[in-house]
């Protein structure tokens, strides 16, 4: 029994340790450039899936971005397929070369991000509203710049280290 438990823990540790290294994208273009990409208006379309990959929600987002005092302010207005509307306002600061920190009302603590090449990895703890309660989950966002106007976002949502959902999101910068 002890051997079985040790094997299970070793396997789980290995699986949790397996994730892409953002530095693998060093040569990928175009450069992500977080502050520049989100300056102005951006539209996005996305879906949420549960741990079985069943689509549970669809949504659109209109994002208005501006820079004030060397901080990127993003006002995100969400409209969900069931008619629910929500707004999140991010304040994002540079903390070093290609390193970022962000805050929003439903984010617990600070979000942290790093961009390399055409990729941005953005991680944070989030208070997810579900029915009449809230659940603390961890978001691991990987955003990939495709060209001057478009980027993709793939998010894994975790609770206690286990993946409980995913978000797929497509962004298009407006003129």
Image (cartoon, grey):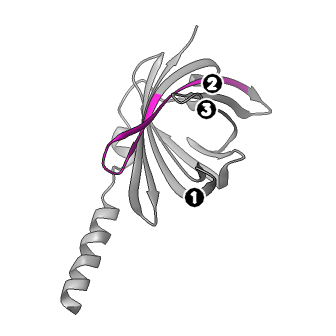
Picture quadrant where residue 73 is located? top right
Left or right: residue 60 versus residue 134 is left
Label 3 environment density (alpha carbons within 10 Å; few <14, some 14–19, many ≥20):
few
Judging by the rendered image, the residue that carries numbered circle 2 is: 63
In this picture, residue 2 sits left or right of residue 63: left
Q: Which residues are magenta?
A: 46-66
Between label 3 and label 1, give the one nearer the viewer. 3
Under circle 1, the secondary element is strand
User: How many residues crowd mark 2 within 10 Å: few (<14), some (14–19), many (20+)?
Assistant: many
The spot of residue 77 in percent (x, y) is: 65, 27
Q: Residue furthest top?
A: 175
The quarter of the picture where the C terminus appears is top right
Does residue 31 sit above or below 9 in this rendering? above
Asked if the magenta segment contains residue 49, the reply would be yes
Residue at point 20%, 91% (across, down):
1
Residue 144 locus on image (x, y percent): 41, 32
Q: Which residue is mark 3?
A: 84
Does 19 sit left or right of 147 as displayed?
Answer: left
The extreme bottom residue here reads 2
Name the residue beneath numbered marker 1: 135
As drawn, 170 above or below 115:
above
For marks 1 and 2 on the same chain, the one whose residue lies earlier in the sequence: 2
Kindly state the secondary structure of the residue where label 3 is placed.
Answer: loop
Q: CA distance from mark 2 to mark 3?
A: 17 Å
Check if residue 47 falls in the magenta segment: yes
Residue 83 picture quarter: top right
Residue 167: % across, % down:
43, 39
């Amino acid at each position: 029994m002890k051997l079985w438990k040790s094997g299970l823990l070793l396997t789980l540790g290995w699986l949790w340790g397996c994730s892409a290294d953002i530095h693998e994208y060093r040569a990928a273009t175009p450069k992500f450039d977080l502050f520049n990409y989100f300056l102005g208006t951006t539209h996005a379309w996305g879906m949420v899936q549960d741990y079985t990959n069943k689509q549970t929600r669809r949504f659109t987002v209109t994002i208005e971005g501006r820079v004030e005092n060397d901080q990127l302010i993003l006002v995100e207005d969400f409209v969900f397929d069931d008619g629910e509307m929500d707004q999140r306002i991010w304040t994002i600061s540079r903390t070093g070369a290609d390193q970022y920190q962000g805050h929003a009302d439903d984010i617990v603590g600070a979000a942290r991000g790093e961009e390399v090449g055409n990729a941005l990895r953005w991680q944070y703890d989030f208070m997810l509203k579900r029915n009449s309660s809230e659940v603390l989950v961890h978001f691991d966002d990987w955003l990939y710049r495709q060209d001057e106007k478009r980027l993709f976002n793939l998010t894994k949502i975790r609770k206690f280290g286990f993946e409980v959902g995913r978000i797929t999101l497509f962004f298009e910068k407006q003129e």
